[in-house]
Structures are given as C-alpha cells and as structure tokens.
Image (cartoon, rainbow, N blue to C red):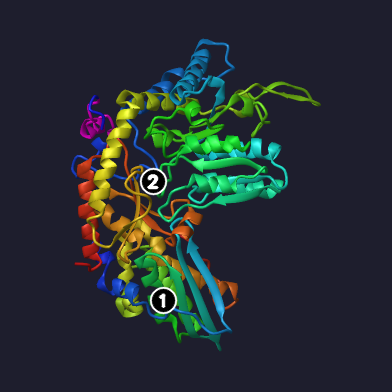
Amino acid sequence: MAATQPSLDAKEIRTQFPFFQKHPEMRSLIYLDNAATTQKPYSVIEVVSHFWAHHNANVHRGSYGVGSKASELYEGARARVARFLNAREMSEIIFTRGTTESINLVANAWGRSHLKPGDEIILTEMEHHANLIPWLCVAKETGAQIVVWPITAEGRLELETLHSLLTERTRLVTVTHISNVLGTINPVADICRIAHEAGALCLVDGAQSVAHTPIDVQAIGCDFFAFSGHKAYGPTGIGVLYGRREVLETMPPFMTGGGMIRSVSWSHVNWAEIPMRFEAGTPPIGEAVGLHAALDFIDSLGRARIEAYEHELTHYALQRLSEVPGLKLYGPQPDRAGIFAFTLEDIHPHDIATILDTRDIAIRSGMHCAHPLGERLGQKATARASLAVYNDTDHIDQLIDGLHYVRKVFGYA
Amino acid sequence: MLNELYREIILDHYRHPRGRGHLDPPKIVQEGMNPLCGDEITLELRVDGGIVEDIKFSGQGCSISQASASMLVEAVRGKRIEEVESLIQQVLAMLRGETEPNESQIGEIAYLAGVRQFPVRVKCATLAWHTLEEALQQHDLKKSPHRTDNLG
C-alpha cells in the first residue's frame, strides 16, 4: 500500500450501509458474495428514494419544471459515468439494464450489421455467459466463427496466444477485465492494442472490475466497455455501455421505439444521434440517479485506495485459505482480484455454502454462469467467496473458521 | 438444525452410494438436472411386467442430491410401478413439508426431511424423485394420472 495514502477502515465504511446495521441480535452477516452483487450505501438508497418522491417525471419530453429536472438528473448521471470512465464525451455513454444488456446491444447492433460469414470473433475461455452466449448466437446468425482463446493451467491469458489466434478475418476480441471465477486480472490495455494492430475491435467486460480498480477507457483503448451498477454499490436495473463514438456511429439501433428517432413517417425512419439511438423507451431514470450516487461513493473512498486496500486483503485471504487442509483454490496467485473459487475435500460446494450460512457467512456456490470454464477446470461447481471494500481481515478469519467447521461436519479431523 | 441435514446416514449414502452405475440395455434412461446449481442425476431403469427389475443412477452434485438418489435406487428396486408411484408422492409431500416424516412407511428416506429447514436445498433432495416421476411419465408407465406439483 502506498505510504502516502491512509488505508481504508472497513468497519467505518460498513456504518454507511444499512444492510450491515440490520442484524442487531445476530452477529452481523459476513457478506462475501460481492461478485454477485454488492450492498448499497445509505447515500444511494436515499438519493433514489428522494428522486421518486420529488423529481419523478419522464425524461427528454416534459416541457415543465419537474420534467426538465428529471432530464437534468438523468443526463447528469451520464456525465458522471463519462467522467468516471474518462470517456472523451458523454454521448459515448449508453444506459442499459446491466452488463448483459450492454453486451447484447453490441452483439446485435454492431454484430449483425458488421459480421459476415467467415469473420472471426475471439473470446476467452474464462468468459461469463454474458460475454459468451450473445456471441454464440450472433455468430450462428451471421455465419461468423467463434475462436476460443484458451487459458493457461494457472488461469491466465497469454498475449502470445492472442497473436497466434488473430487473423485478417478477426473482427472483435472480447474479454473480461477480471474473471468472476478465477479472479484473474487481464491485461486489457495490451489486449486492445494487439487487437487494434490486427484491425479488430476490442470489448472489455468490466462487471467485476469497475468497483475495484480505476478505469480509464482511453488508457485501456477499448472500443466498448460494459458494466453493471449493482456490482458497484448502485441499484439493479442500470448498467452502462461505453462505446467509442466512431464505432457507435456505424451501428444501427438495438431496440426501437420512442426516444430513439429523429423523424419518422410511414415510409422512413431517421435514427437519433448517439447515445439516444440506443435508448429506446423510457430509461431507468431513478436507477441512473442511484448509479451517480454509487460512483460518488466509490470516489469518496478513492479508487486507488480501494484497489490498494482490496489488494492487501486479497493477499491476506490467499495466505489464510492456504492453511485449510484439503482446500483447492482456482486461479492465479499471488496477483489477482479478491474473488476466490475453491473446492474443499470431497465436500460439494452447495454443502459448503449451506454450512457457512448457518454461521451467517454468505458465499456463492455453483457454476457461476461460466459453464465452459467449469469444464476446462474439470470442476463444474465451486464455492466462491468474493470481497468488497467493506470486508476486512476479521471476515476472512471467520470464513476460515467456518471452513474448518465444514470439514468437521463432514467428518474430517 | 445442521445435524438434522447432515445425518450420518446421508453422508454415508453420499460417500458410498448404492446402485451408482449403468445398466446394460435395454433400459429407460432419464436425465434430471437443476440448471441453476448444476446438480445432475441420470436414472436408468429396466421395467418388466409392471415391476422395476433394476435401477441405477449416475450424476454429480451435492451430498443431498446424491444421497437422495442413492436412497431412491435402494427403495424402488424390485417394487411394482404402483408402489413406486405412491412412494414418490409420499416422499415429495414430505420434502415439501406437507406431511411429517414417517420412518415406518418410507424407511431411512425419512431422514431427508432435515432439508426442510433449508428451503434452498429442498430442490436438491427432490431432484431424483422428480426425475423418476418424469421417467414413468415419459415412458407411459404411470398408472394413476395425478398431477404433481413441481415445487422445489
């Protein structure tokens, strides 16, 4: 951790979250399922509630005061996201329902209009279904080919492999920034540079990175960056697609309806400019306002500080997990994100999660929406603990104690 | 609560499953799965003269899903289809909490009732039984046409 930056106090941060105040009789819940969704601070909940109570009106329509205030707040959220990602302009920010919709937007709007039979899309073996199934579907429809970029035994991507997979037919390289199973942090700036050198575009799935590491889409150099509000302390139902203007302008709409046209007659439709072209219908206004507050929350802690704090906590967790007999951890070490998929002896992950739940420790078990990766690992289901900024070493210690207890229940000494 | 879920007898079925394997053809094969959690059970049956002559299971999943399948295989082998149907309904009703576990009627399967304290795990216990029910329906072996509720 940088000496000039004071560390974060997770206990103090938890006081900003009603979720952690709600269990007065019990030991408070140890929430370690942050890769699935994060809890929400008061600031987000209150601003959303205030919006519905005082500013609710449709956007870009009403010629009355409340309507213009709603539009101002909605567009203010767009500007906030643009600043958060360091996009060149706010018109490069499209609001969606989440990462899944963002990637479906690219697959449908860009994919269907640009992909031809024989074109190639490179995607990695560690992708979440959200960055896998849209491409399988669009490839089937367009005749494009999916080229799989395999992971190493350790769970990393090698850039030399990417070089060998790129051809003159490669149109897109699509990659997760941080794996939701392995915790691998991928070198997305290098990947984008290499993809561009080969004439391909690059999409980065930022679902697992946006709340944990500073994001600068210009420095990464990606053409698309997708993330969800709810994994970044914000509401569900709001997500973002960043797209480079030059690319977005070549894309037809994904969905059609109100708000996304310039003019329409029975014979002709003239699409609106970006980003409105991609936001048919009434958008998630209150949720966008909540996302604004969530990004403010993140920046109030400081993204570099969050990254440093979670990095330290991750190292502590790796050390402690290595002390549990019969525990097999997946993914690279030591440099990785705070997402730990593991198995324990012959105990099925669902059983691990159930037993930990009786100790008020929430982890995830299952296939984590990454079936091909599970096949590759030879381990379909795993247990997964994942960190956020309000977790601390005490939570890790309780998890480790819990895992010893799980072993005991299953008859391991 | 936890002790009731992970009874020794359940862990024993998990670690030493009865009737895990495959039948030589001819046989009825029925696959069941919980797509959200990945539990998988495949049942293979040989039915002759209205009797389940032999049955095996394969698959993977949590201790509850696999122990339940192991208990199922032991319980239905050699039984008449009507008896099997009746047993399926008894077990599912118990797992759904509609009836109390009755060891004198359903034997050690009654110990699966501990799962009722863990609502998200009920579907693990019911998987094998729903799969068997599906096998009977798919292959027109079902005697009584009562509807079943796919809860859990």
Looking at the rendered image, the quarter that the C terminus of chain A falls into is bottom left
Span colored in magenta: A5-19
**What's under tag 2, amino acid-wise?**
Gly
List the single residue furthest toward the right: A267
Percent from the top left, x then y, of residue A367? 44, 55
- In the depicted view, which residue is nearer to us: B42 or A373? A373
Estimate how packed mark 1 is, as few (under 14), some (14 to 19) or many (20 or more) residues with alpha carbons within 10 Å: many
Percent from the top left, x then y, of residue A209? 41, 37
Residue A118 in view, yes or no: yes
Residue linked to disc 1: B72
Q: Residue at x 50, y 23 (%)?
A: A87
Residue A360 in view, yes or no: no
Position of residue A282 relative to residue A376, above or below, is: above
**What kind of element bears circle 1?**
helix
Whether residue A199 sits left or right of residue A225 in the image: it is: right
Residue linked to disc 2: A183
Please give the chain letter of the residue carrying mark 1.
B
